[in-house]
Image (cartoon, rainbow, N blue to C red):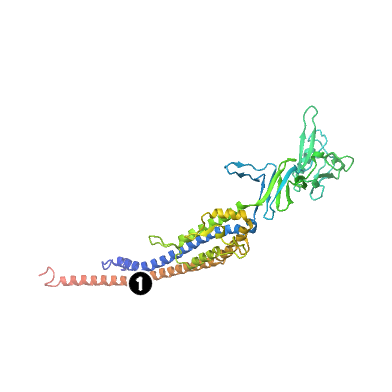
Amino acid sequence: MAISSLGVGSGLALEDLVTQLVQAERKPKLEALQQRQNTVDVSLSGYSKLKSALSKVEDSLDLLSSPLEMNSRTALINGVSSSGSTTEDGETSTANPYLSATASSSAPAASYNISVESLAQGSKAKSGSFTSSSEVISSSAGTLSFATANGENSFDVAVEAGATLQDIANAINSNNNNYGVSASIVNTGGATPETRLVFSSSMTGAENELVVSNDNAELDSISTVATGATAGMTIAAEDQASDAKLIIDGISVFSATNTFSDAISGVELTAKEVSPGNNQTVEVTTDKQSVKDTINSFVESYNEFIDVANSLTNVNVEGRSGALVGDSMLRGLRSGMNNILGGAVASAEVGANTLYSIGLTFEEDGKLGFVTDGEAKLDQALEDDFDKVSKLFANDDGLGASLDSYIKQYTQTGGLFETKTDVFDEQKKDIQNELEQFNRYMEGYEQNLREEYQALDSMIARMNQTMTALQGQLGSLPGFGGNS
């Protein structure tokens, strides 16, 4: 009869013995594999944190290395930005109600006196009198054609036989090719009520005057150009499409829209409200605050990266090490960044060719900070020679471009970080393969133990059975047991 459990036949604790032997064999190897797995996971997590911190540095470098950003201009109207600003006493000034202005980096520093003489408008054509919106306009089918006077925009509306005024208005408003003409019906009411049709065009500018023509004289009553005798739609002088007009330093300038993109080189002006003769002072100047904010943003992101790097390489008082203590790649990264930021820019001008020259220095923990009165030194540098500061960061060999190019060696696809994490991923696979192989080994090891101890258990059981039988036989002999 087969033994179902170890030790049943012999009475020995063989099951416990096998369990203890298996655990003794398994534990050291599993602990070693787990330790290796933890090391890899911690390193991967460390590099992930490092890359995330560096990506913020790269984001700030996008602005710091951009000549457009570092040479930015601002346009002030009567001393206030177009969106309003906060004054020194903390009160908020409102945006200019007549005009807004934005300046590109190519805009020359200058001051202008500007008045808004008129705003751009589209055409408005009005019909003669009809009895009601249900009045039939045409007994036969035809086509209404809408266009701007310059011919750049047009669309056609099919008018069915027996179409009413309301039918035609609906057809115009729902036309898929309509470039911006709305049809509305006005009922005057009163003692002698009338119904009139109004066409309003959103296309502003003198060259975009609305022209409505037809191929059926019955539609002349709702056209500005007659096929027969007289057109029924008229555009009053005050309703004609017209340009916006500004007077800039005594010079009249015009635009088909309320936006003037090239009236002043590098400056975009938007007319908002008419104010004839009411001059607004528009001053284009270097945007020192924006450049200072960009520099401070870089310093902040760089210092956040240093905080992360320090936490990953420090050993605390309890002896616990950071995830990347002794990591040669991180040491090389920090060394390279320090060399760039601590060096001089060859193409920049003496007196503003290093970080120290504009008030910044390295602190003991590796962060960037202002020297004593350093922030005032930066303000003075921006005030005295704005372009020198821009060159320090935004030239082709400037700190921004050089640092960005260096960091990308690590963070780009196929870069050093990706190569390093690929190595870690391979190590994880190797550990998993070792674990699978070890588990198969342990299955065989346990099976062998069980077979050996099962054989021992069976042998001892047979010996016990033999001994019991012998004792029974001996007990039946004279002189043994209780017989005399």
Q: Residue at x 63, y 52 (%)?
A: 287
Where is residue 122? Give x, y as percent.
77, 43
Name the amino acid, label 1. Answer: Asn
Where is residue 348? Give x, y as percent.
62, 62
Locate residue 441 relative to residue 55 in the image: left or right.
left
Total labels: the figure holds 1
Q: Residues within 10 Å of mark 1 (few under 14, many from 20)?
A: few
Judge whether 78 appears above or below 371 on screen. above
Locate residue 243 relative to residue 433 in the image: left or right.
right
- Residue closest to the eye, 251 or 352: 352
Q: Which residue is mark 1?
A: 448
The C terminus lies in quadrant:
bottom left
Q: Residue at x 35, y 72 (%)?
A: 448
Q: Residue at x 38, y 71 (%)?
A: 444
- Residue closest to the eye, 142 or 379: 379
Locate residue 102 relative to residue 440 in the image: left or right.
right
Residue lying at the far top in this picture: please name it.
191
- Residue closest to the eye, 401 or 128: 401
